[in-house]
Image: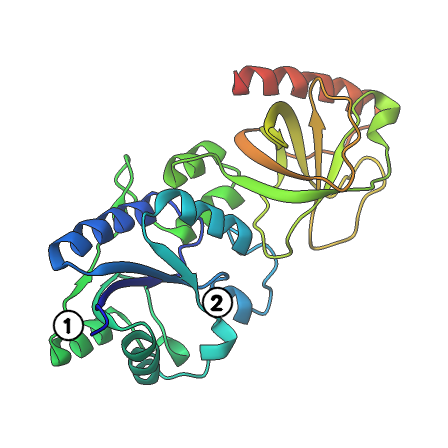
Amino acid sequence: MTRKKLITIGTFDGVHLGHKALFAKLEQLSVKLQMKAQVLYFPYPPKSLLAEQPAMTVLSTPPEKKALLKKCLSCRAEELNFQMYREYTAEKFFKKVLLEKYNCGAILAGPDFAFGKNRQGNSEFLKNKCAQLGIPCEIFPFYDGEDGSKISSSLIRKTLAEGDIKTANALLGRPYSLEGRVIEGKKLGRKIGFPTINLDINFYKLLPLGVFAVKVRVGRKFYRGICNIGFRPTVNPIDSIIPLVEVHLLDFRRSIYGHRVEVFFYDKIRSESKFDGLDALKAQLSQDKESACRLID
């Protein structure tokens, strides 16, 4: 007979401290119940895929999430195709997917997780269905941060949108990061002594607006930097709902067009501003460089 599995299922956007606490509980329960643990997740939050304005609504893109889960799990994590199951009722998803496809013998879920069309399968649905079948079901409570706030992906999104990088990082348990490919830009930064790399970022990725102290991974090496995310109001303003991501790397001279780099956010330096000419912008960037060095060090 195929061994029953202890399953946890969710979106796990950002893979934050609350998710990590749930995964620790999953490991404990798998030993207690003598079941193999399995994590099922949606690469994108379904509400982002269904949103009228889906741009910049996720903390972790599918590749980022896959890497983060791999780092913190000792069991297998498998992606669920939302489009394949979006019309399933909660009853059908529970029976066809959890019970039949994944041989579910026990369930661990967060209090706000829901599945099935119109989010019919909430925590109460899960508890009732599992009780009917004699399947252990545990709803893991929200995990509280140091200040007593309940850690959630939506709270972290709100915190990042407000530019509070330090709080967001504390809730995540790591620096917020984004990954992108270096693309050709206007090369305007070179004219004032601050060359930048422009990054092509996933459409769904949440981008905090402003100027930030960052570290950038290029290959296996890390470099300090200043990241500007915005609409370039001083020189060649852009007209787009998606802001431009530009990074000035300190003590870096190589050409890396086409390379993928990862940017780690440490703190916000200031909001994006319009300056009276290039000299004023250059003077401000010199101050930003000093601020970035101080904040990162």
How packed mark 2 is, by other alpha carbons closer than 10 Å (few <14, some 14-19, many 20 or more), is few
Residue 255 quadrant:
top right
Amino acid beneath label 2: Lys
Residue at (81% x, 35% y) in the render: 234
Outermost residue to the front: 1
- Residue at image coords 46%, 43%: 159
- Residue at x-position 32% and y-position 46%: 20
Give the CA separation, mark 1 to mark 2. Answer: 29 Å
- Relative depth, front residue between 134 and 291: 134
In the figure, is residue 212 to the left or right of 273? left
Instruction: Kindly identify which numbered label has been placed on residue 135.
Output: 1
Q: Is residue 188 left or right of residue 289?
A: right
Q: Residues within 10 Å of mark 1 (few under 14, many from 20)?
A: some
Residue type marked 1: Ile
The relative height of residue 157 versus residue 117 in the rendered view (above or below) is above
Q: Nearer the viewer, residue 281 or 152?
A: 152
Instruction: Name the quarter where the N terminus is drawn.
Output: bottom left
Q: Position of residue 291 (x, y in %)?
A: 60, 18
User: How is colour applied across the structure in the image?
Assistant: rainbow
The mark closer to the camera, 1 or 2, is 1
Instruction: Tell me the residue that label 2 is attached to.
Output: 47
Q: Where residue 270 sits: x, y (%)?
A: 61, 29
Q: Position of residue 25 (x, y in %)?
A: 21, 50
Q: Specify whether residue 77 is in view.
A: yes
Name the element at disc 2.
helix
User: In the rendered image of this protein, does residue 87 appear above or below residue 178?
Assistant: below
Is residue 277 visible from the viewing direction of this image?
A: no
Instruction: List x then y, in percent, for residue 240.
Output: 75, 54
Q: Residue at x 33, y 84 (%)?
A: 92
